[in-house]
Amino acid sequence: MSDFSMLDYGLGIFQALLIIVLSPLIVGIMRKTKAKSQKRIGSGIFQPYYDIIKLLRKDEIISDQSSWIFRATPWINFVTTASAAFFIPVFLVYSPFGVVGDILLVVGLFALGRFFTMLAGLDTASSFGGLGSSREMMVSVLVEPALFMTIFVIASFYGGTNISTIVSSANDTSILVVPGILFALIAFFIIMMAETGKLPFDNPSTHLELTMIHEAMVLEYSGKSLALMEWSHAIKQIILFTLFVDIFLPWNFVEQISLIGISFGIMLFIVKVSALASFTAFIETRVAKWRLFRVSDLIAMAISSSMIGVIFFFL
Amino acid sequence: MSENLSIVYVIIAFFSLGATLGLFTRGQKYHAYFTYIPSAFASFLTIILSLAIFSSENIHLTFFNIQHLFDFEIFIDGVAAFFLLIIGLIPFAVSIYSLSYSKKFDDKKNNSALGMLFNVFIISMILVVISNNVFFFLIFWELMSLTSFFLVIYEHENKNNLKSGLTYLVMTHLGTGFIFASFMLMYAQTGSFSFDSFRDVTIIPQYVKDIAFVLAFVGFGTKAGMIPLHTWLPKAHPSAPSNVSALMSAVMLKIAIYGIVRYLFDFNAIGSSSDYVWLGVGIIIIGSISALVGILYALVENNIKRALAFSSIENIGIIFIGLGLSVVFAAFHLLSLSVLAFIASMFHTLNHSIFKGLLFMTAGSIHYSTHTKNIEDLGGLIKKMPWTAMMFLIGSIAIIGLPPLNGFIGEWLTLQSLLAVFQIPSNILQVSLAFAILAFALTIGLAGATFVRLFGITFLSKSRSSKAINAVEVPRLMLIGKAILASSCVLLGILPFIGINLIVSAFDLPYTPSSPFETISITNADGSNFASLLMPAVLIIFVSVIVGIFAFVRIIGGKTKTIKYGTWDCGFGSLSERTQYTATSLAEPIRRIFGIFYNPYNDITVNSYAKENLYLKKSINVISTTRNIFDEKLYGKIISGSLFVLDKIRKIQSGKVNAYILYIMITLIALLLFVGFGIHE
């Protein structure tokens, strides 16, 4: 740990802050893309920022049935996702906090946030919350094997679960079109859609009991708590996008620290992540919500895809 | 060394004191103190003993040397000391807990037997671990099984408890039979009943060691609750009083793990031989199946203690996965990976003892103040029993392996050793072990869902019955007992090197212990970092993020009000405890997807007002049940098969005297023929 200078740590914190600050922007870009592809004008890409600030200033109404779990969950959610941001390389080829935790810790932190969100859904004694928790339970249970298989493929290919190691060896690899990695990419994309509650898994833009999963759990939140919930959801989403970019599109990461290099790196990062976000949003407008029990088929596809990746690695 | 030995005597003396006082002070006011304070003290000494053994020499002593059969040898090495630590720590907490918990039985029945058996049960486990001779090992093993059997049927007024006790008795003796056979096989080779001669690997041929190990594995595995020999576990553990369930799940299962570890690394001496690959793979397969199936049944279970018992099966499975991987890696000369997998497995053993003890004690607290184990009757307990809820939450987060608690470290290490299988130079093995990752990942996911359900339905939302409405927080001593284990969960999670160092020095692993604030790191051959984890730093990041966001919200958001109001009811009103999600409905999607394991069955009866018009319904009753395919398909078949055979055999016993004389004749002739034509040397 000692071979990093203060500058490195400063940049590491800057990377994490960049993720936290840019996350609402990505939500805005995705909403805009969706609006455009549906022939709507849509709100501006900075709207999520205004929403968060507005919500932070509002009074809160909480259910009289709820306990401290309900009140603590937004904070826990924010803390887990924002802490996970520290381990993700954004424009540098490494994160100075890479030794502190690896991709499994990031998965664990997300799971901790989700654990509390599911409990909060049950806490308000409303049937909506239970419904959301129940469905989230199912999706998260099924996603887990796909996720770990994908991590297995990536770890085997790039020699580590440490994200900095993965990114630096991916950055050094001249050819990225390896069959194993391609299958891992398919699997990771599906996992990403499931984890961030995108169509066809979940439709966060409706409040209809037939479709909602994540929204049902956070239905009772208002004011500050809602702002934190939305924000941490956005951070989780941008972290998954960044991981996708880090692992599968790892070009031109900054290896030598210089002002030009870093600013170029930040630009490139924003371009790559927004492109991925727009692509995801575009896909969302092209599919319909799947029936809940067909979702397992899609996740099974992700599992088999990553399994094929494993086999390709060993061939 | 002599001080350590005197600690052993004091431990035995105090447990005996607890047991006798427990019997002789029956019905008195301070009965619980006389029984459980000696056991708490002796357990505490057990912790000290094990820590002393880590830093000094082993104890090896033969007591009376009459015949070789009856030597009472004790041998406390690092391996035994590690398990003694578990037998010290959990009973220490459980004894303090029992001081109050045993009052539950005060007005119902005499709890002198409970106190006596409790003490004998703990001392028998200690003696199993320290005895170094087949004869005494088996005697104490049997003592452990029998005392726990009597504890299982302690509340024998309930017919179900008697039945589960009987299942336990049969299954545990089946296991003992296998262990006995294995020991006899070793005896036949070595000609000695001492474990010392079993350690001498040179005289025993390979195939005998293999057979002996498989027999022992089945025997100890039955005690550990591996699938498909697990059937007693989810019946017996919930039947016992909760302090005993905590001991059984947290400690007794680990004694079985102790047996397997002894065989695997001490008697069998897993060296670097490729002969052991199949053995390791076998253990991994059984471990994966146990983990997955155990947690699948825990997920749909409505009896909180039975759900915890099923989750014990899962955790034993995870421990087996680590052990198996360790064997496989050792067979391929990947020594450092083998050490990693072994540390993972032992770390999880320690972890599981701690959080399962904690969870069973909290389940006992819930039963103590609500008198029900059915989570469908509970709900809203977080407001009535805030501290118990906190403990259960810590236990849940630990058991499902979430950071920053100890379960995460155990599962992280296990997962790292699973991810390292790509270093095994065999393609078939690599791809097949990838399926173990699949099973393991699914297990982790299902465990998360299980404990969301257990915690959410038990503690959150509205109370579902008057039992839960009238609940009150349990006495302070019960909370202290739980708090000891809860704080161990936190400590081992944040400073995992405390546990890792213990394991390293206990098992004499080729790895230098490091300071508790060190990074756990796994490096590749080329020196790059494969994975690393530094929990104290994670905690620092946590704290700084909390401070940061709190300040941000305060500055941007300013001061806002929080208003309490009813839950949103879509404007219809009348939200009641009947409109919220139930435990069964919460698990419904998963129950449907994994229906093949549960055979879910809905029994719907419609009562209509008139027979002629079925559309006007008076009431609809739905009974939704799940079934255990192991009990139904496997054990059901075995039981009906043996009943069929026994029914046929019964015909021999006709009750006629002349038939019996005929049998004697036939036997006599057969024996004469055997002697006459038998092989004489």
Image (cartoon, coloured by chain):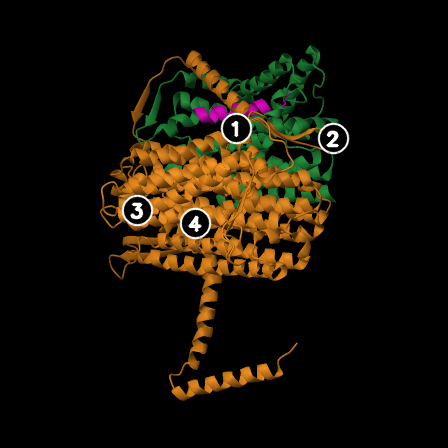
Closer to the camera in the image, B251 or B438: B251
Seen in the image, is B205 located left or right of residue B454?
right
Q: Amino acid at mark 2?
A: Asp
Q: Which residues are magenta?
A: A75-90
Q: Specify the amino acid type for callout 3.
A: Gly
Left or right for B247, reference A187: left
Q: Is residue B298 above or below residue B218?
A: above
Q: Which residue is mark 4?
A: B124
Give the colour chain A carries in the figure.
green
Q: Is residue B10 visible?
A: yes
Residue A79 colored magenta? Answer: yes
| Whether labels 4 and 1 share one chain | yes
Q: Earlier in the sequence, mark 4 or mark 2?
A: 4
Predominant SS along the magenta part: helix
Q: Which residue is mark 1?
A: B495
Could you tell which of marks 2 and 1 lies nearer the N-terminus? 1
Asked if badge 4 and badge 2 are on a common chain, one would say: yes
The label on residue B22 is 3
Residue B310 pos. (x, y %): 45, 48
Chain-order first, disc 1 or disc 3: 3
Measured in 3D between alpha carbons, the distance from the residue under mark 4 to the one under mark 1, in whole angstroms, is: 32 Å
Tag 3 subunit = B
Badges 3 and 4, same chain? yes
Label 2: which residue? B526
